[in-house]
Image (tube, grey):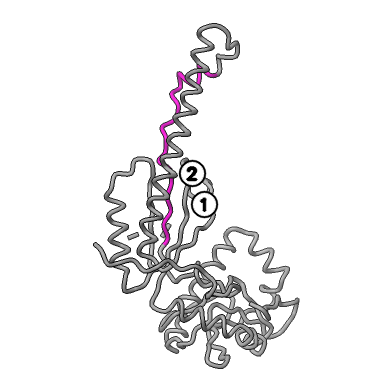
Amino acid sequence: MSGTTTAGPGAPGIVCAFAVTRTPPDAAALAAARGHEEGGPLRLVRAGGLCLVVQDVPATLFDQEALTERLNRPGDLERCARAHHRGVEAAAGRGPVVPLPMATLYRGDPTAAQAVTDRREALEALLDRLRDRTEWAVKVHAAEAPPEPAAEAGAQAGAGAGAGAGGRAYLSRVSARRRDRQGAHDRALAEAEAVDAELRRYAVAATRHRPQSERLTGHRAPQLLNVAYLVEDARRAAFTGALARIAAARRPAVRIDASGPWIPYSFARWDEDPRSGPEAPAAPDREEVRS
């Protein structure tokens, strides 16, 4: 957000901001929520008709150098991400919220309030867009292929000569396996695109994230699609019904993981004008799932 500052060493009054809302959360629920373990209680900073949920945090742990070092450690990064999500959830107790990027820091309440004021028009538009809508995440992976038989691996290692009928037969098998793998990949992509096309019929909007690596997913097969859908609460049953039909259908080339409902992080980009984003037309009525 314009106006965001990174605290310098020893700077007083460092506040960490979690989310913007126009409907203040219940005071008792906010007091009971936990943000960063090192900080004070969650509280509100008012900026005109909007509220910013913040937490006072120590500058010694949240200045630029200390924070960069902490966020480079996987354990600390995960703890910061969980703390940020708890703050966003606390802000969402009574209405839509615009989550801010993790570790959004300001030097004091006036700077935080000014940052909200500077972006008020865009924030109001986002809050209108997100009212009574939630996010659903769907990840489509290719089906895991069985490993090559040991005999084939041995044949590959011993095919160095590559001459004669045996060598030609081996190269033919290799070429055939390559075509089979490409064909399987093309079928998986086609099925993944069909899943996405079907789910978009029940969503207000959808956005594709970069597929996650095999190291992150824990699966040998590649992730083909990583899509977030913005769904009207009134159409949640239609969307989950479509998910159920997709899960029940035999799709041998892919595996589908779905989760939700979530706070719509993927559709709350405060640095973009929400009025410029494409929205899918509403689908006619017809007749769970986080990784």
What secondary structure is marked by label 1? loop
Q: Is residue 14 magenta?
A: no
Q: Are marks 1 and 2 in contact (CB under 8 Å)?
A: yes
User: In the picture provided, is 205 more to the left or to the right than 239?
Assistant: right
Q: Tell me the quadrant of the picture where the C terminus can be found.
A: bottom left
Q: Secondary structure at mark 2?
A: loop
The earlier-in-sequence mark between 1 and 2 is 1
Quarter of the view holding residue 121: bottom right
Q: Amino acid at mark 1?
A: Pro
Q: Residue at x 46, y 84 (%)?
A: 30
- Expressed as whole percent of the image width and height from the top left, the position of residue 281 reads 40, 68
Q: Nearer the viewer, residue 26 or 130?
A: 130
Range of residues picked out in magenta: 137-156
The residue drawn where x is 69% and y is 63% is 69
User: Which residue is under mark 2?
Assistant: 222
Kind of residue at disc 2 = Pro
**Residue depicted at 55% across the width and 81% down the height:** 123
Horizontal and vertical percent position of residue 263: 44, 71
Label 1 to label 2, Cα distance in Å? 8 Å
Left or right? Give the position of 112 relative to 49. Answer: right
Q: Quadrant of the N terminus?
A: bottom right
Q: Which mark is residue 211?
A: 1
The question of residue 144 being in magenta is answered with yes
As drawn, 200 above or below 54: above
